[in-house]
Image (cartoon, rainbow, N blue to C red):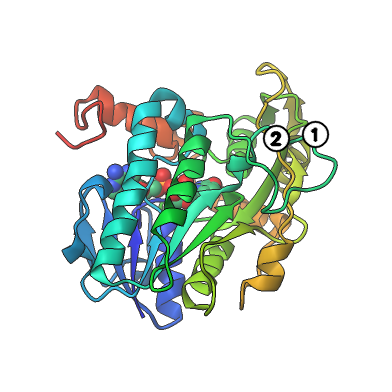
Amino acid sequence: MRILITGHCGYIGPVMTRLFHQAGHEVVGFDTGFFKDLIGAAEPGCIPDYEISGDIRDIVIKDFAGIEGVVHLAALSNDPMGNIAAGQTHSINTEGTIRCATMAKQAGASRFVFASSCSVYGASGNSAVPLDEHAPVAPVSAYAVSKVDAEKALQTIADDSFRTVMLRNATAYGVSPRMRLDLVLANLMASGYATGVIEVLSDGTPWRPLVHIEDISRAALSALTAEALNHSVFNIGAADCNYTVREIAEVAAKQFPECSINITGQNGSDPRSYRVDFTRALTDLPGFAPQWNLEKGAKQTHDWLSAAPRDLKVLFGNRYIRLSHLEKLLREHQVSETFRWL
Ligand SMILES: NC(=O)c1ccc[n+]([C@@H]2O[C@H](COP(=O)([O-])OP(=O)(O)OC[C@H]3O[C@@H](n4cnc5c(N)ncnc54)[C@H](O)[C@@H]3O)[C@@H](O)[C@H]2O)c1
């Protein structure tokens, strides 16, 4: 299959590209390249067969030439970025998704897999049972709202010849050639590695489901190739991957036994808290079988960190923290306030 991955120059994209290549597919990438240069040693398999440089808000029908399936990753992709640029988060994540799906449909692609997020469940931490796909959404950030709105819009674009699948991915972990250290597991481990203290700024109680980026990529591959899915919604994670932030810190600390854990609580209790039920993907998403767990992912992250400088400024600088890098692009007038290249 010839597959277009949007946002292929981010954290998940290179790992997904490698997995799709291993499965024998041809990959075209489409990305504006905010993080293009921030790449470590990448195997050739991580690079698409063909790359298009462009903004998702301007994507056109000819960008989908010969494309059968699309995995739409391109986004301003976390809560902090949504907080500094709520309008642009809506414009790129919601309107950009609508444009991408509309153009893909007109071009004759038959399957559209959308990278949504478990953060759509937002402030649902007190639910007595883990949330399945029928649970009401409760987004508490511009980022999560943008995903909810994009999901709704896709429902109106889907039809029998253009099938859409929503993957509500848990928070990611795992090593990528374009590594991020702003996601909870890697963030806690990087702080432990650089300072000897794993510092938790919340009170440690919020629930966060976690999933490895290779397993997200596996889910996307299953969603692209499985028959009979249409406007289906799947929570993506392994069976037992709901952790409190305190538990994540404990898993991180096992990799750095010399580190202590300090739950400062300085940011109070984080309203973003959700426990999620992943049964549907594990039973109804054909071929989807997660292969990672948090301990294995923490070991992989430990090994990556051990080869990185033990320097807080480097680890928490713009190379590995999405928000810092985008702020740098804005500060240096490399991109405009609408996140277009100048
Ligand atoms: N990483 C996670 O924990 C996680 C969890 C759930 C869902 N997701 C979703 O998965 C997707 C990929 O996540 P990621 O961690 O790889 O994100 P990332 O920020 O590392 O990469 C996003 C990519 O999108 C590109 N992009 C941004 N705006 C664009 C635009 N206007 N036009 C074209 N390209 C644009 C960026 O240049 C970047 O390469 C996102 O949609 C994200 O919301 C991620």
Looking at the picture, tell me which residue is in the foreground, 231 or 146. 231
Residue ID for mark 2: 273
The residue lying furthest to the right in this view is 128
Nearer mark to the viewer, of 1 and 2: 1
The location of residue 91, given as percent across then percent down, is 33, 37
Mark found first going from the N terminus, 1 or 2: 1
- Residue occupying image coordinates x 20% and y 72%: 65
Residue ID for mark 1: 126
Q: Amino acid at mark 2?
A: Ser
- Which circle marks residue 15 in the picture? none
**Left or right of 208, for residue 83:** left
Q: Report if the beta carbon of the residue with label 2 is closer than 8 angstroms to ligand 1.
A: no
Q: Callout 1: 10 Å neighbours few (<14), some, many (20+)? A: few
Give the CA separation, mark 1 to mark 2. Answer: 8 Å
Element at label 2: loop
Decide if residue 116 is in sight here. Answer: yes
Q: Callout 2: 10 Å neighbours few (<14), some, many (20+)? A: many
Asked which quadrant contains residue 126, the reply is top right
The location of residue 135, given as percent across then percent down, is 70, 46
Asked which quadrant contains residue 72, the reply is bottom left
The location of residue 153, given as percent across then percent down, is 43, 49
Q: Amino acid at mark 1?
A: Asn
- Residue occupying image coordinates x 42% and y 62%: 158
